[in-house]
Structures are given as C-alpha cells and as structure tokens.
Amino acid sequence: MGKRKRGNIVLGALGGVLIVGGAALLAGVLLAPEQVEKGYGGVKVAIGSTIDSVQEEVFEELPTVTVGATGGIPELDLCDGTFTIMTSYEREGVPETAAAHNNCGGDVLLSWDEGQRIRIDGRDEVYEVVDIRYTSKIWSSTDDLVGLQGEIALQSCFYGEDRMKFVGLEPVSET
C-alpha cells in the first residue's frame, strides 16, 4: 500500500473520530446542558487553579482581581472581566460585595479556600479569604450573607449548578 493511500486512511479515520466526538458533544449539550456546563466549568476552574498555584510558587505572584463599576445586573452583564460592586447586596451586616459571572472571570474564586491570598488591582493591600458562604442562586437573599466576615466580599456562580460562592476578604500583612 502506498504512502498516500495510508495517509488517506489515517485522515479518514481521524475525521470519523472527530465527527463522532462532535455528535456526542452536541447530543450532550442538547440533552444534558447542566452536566456539560458543570464538567466544562470543573475543568476550567482546575486549570485556572493550577495556573494560580504555579504563578504563586514560581513567580511569587498572587491571583489578582479587578473591582470595577458599582451597580446591578446591567453592569454585571457587561462582562468586562471586572467584579461589579452590587448595590443589591447592600445591607447592614454584609460587607461590600462585588460579583462577576463565572464565564467573565468570576470563576477564579471558585477554587479558593480560607487562607488564600489575593490582590485587588489598584489597592496596596494583600487580602486573605477569611470566610466562605455558599447559597442557592434562586431562593436566597441577603439574609444568607449577614455575618459574612471580611472588609469586602467577592461572589460568582458555579457552572451548571444552582449555587453561588461568596468569599469574605480581609487585608493582611504581606509576611
């Protein structure tokens, strides 16, 4: 058999595998979109967490977020890579809270645990996660956030789940 014929067979087989894989992915998106989104989000968060770990250990750089506009859903939906200070979260006993959609950079906080240190762009302090709250995306209110510790909180939603994560941040010394 000639090289050209073998090459055509290999390319044909590869094309077949790609078509079957694409069809399976399309079927998953149509039949189980939440599970596909959850799987995609899990992989994306794991990769981001690994990148953050390498930056922190090798380059001694902390994850950095940017807090942008103050407002509500319209500002949040701009999806400009910043966390929006949400006026709807303003309440006695709840720290100033900034949110970002998971697919607009907010997913960076989904892998954080208490003790994680970060920077907020434009601020000199280093912040540490001192409290974490998980709430439903649908039937929750600011009542669920009363007592959240920290000077500022960040919020984002999990992929493919009815859950939000709030992290309370407190400035700490850099040592």
Image (spheres, rainbow, N blue to C red):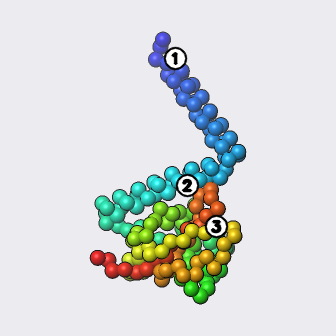
Query: What residue is drawn where x is 41% and y is 76%?
Result: 127
Tag 1, which secondary structure? helix
Q: Between disc 2 and disc 1, whose residue precedes?
A: 1
Q: Which circle marks residue 41 in the picture?
A: 2
The mark lying in front, picked from 3 and 2, is 3
What kind of residue is marked 3?
Answer: Ser
Q: Residue tagged by mark 1?
A: 5
Q: Between disc 3 and disc 2, whose residue precedes?
A: 2
The mark lying in front, picked from 3 and 1, is 3
What kind of residue is marked 1?
Answer: Lys
Among all residues in the image, which is located at the extreme bottom?
Answer: 92
Please tell me which residue lies in front, 23 or 116. 116
Q: Residue tagged by mark 3?
A: 136
Tag 2, which secondary structure? helix
Pick the quarter of the image with the C terminus: bottom left
Q: Residues within 10 Å of mark 3 (few under 14, many from 20)?
A: some
Up/down of 69 relative to 28, above or below: below
Q: Position of residue 147 (x, y in %)?
A: 54, 82
Left or right of residue 39, residue 28 in this image:
right
- Give the Cα distance between marks 3 and 1: 57 Å
What kind of residue is marked 2?
Answer: Gly
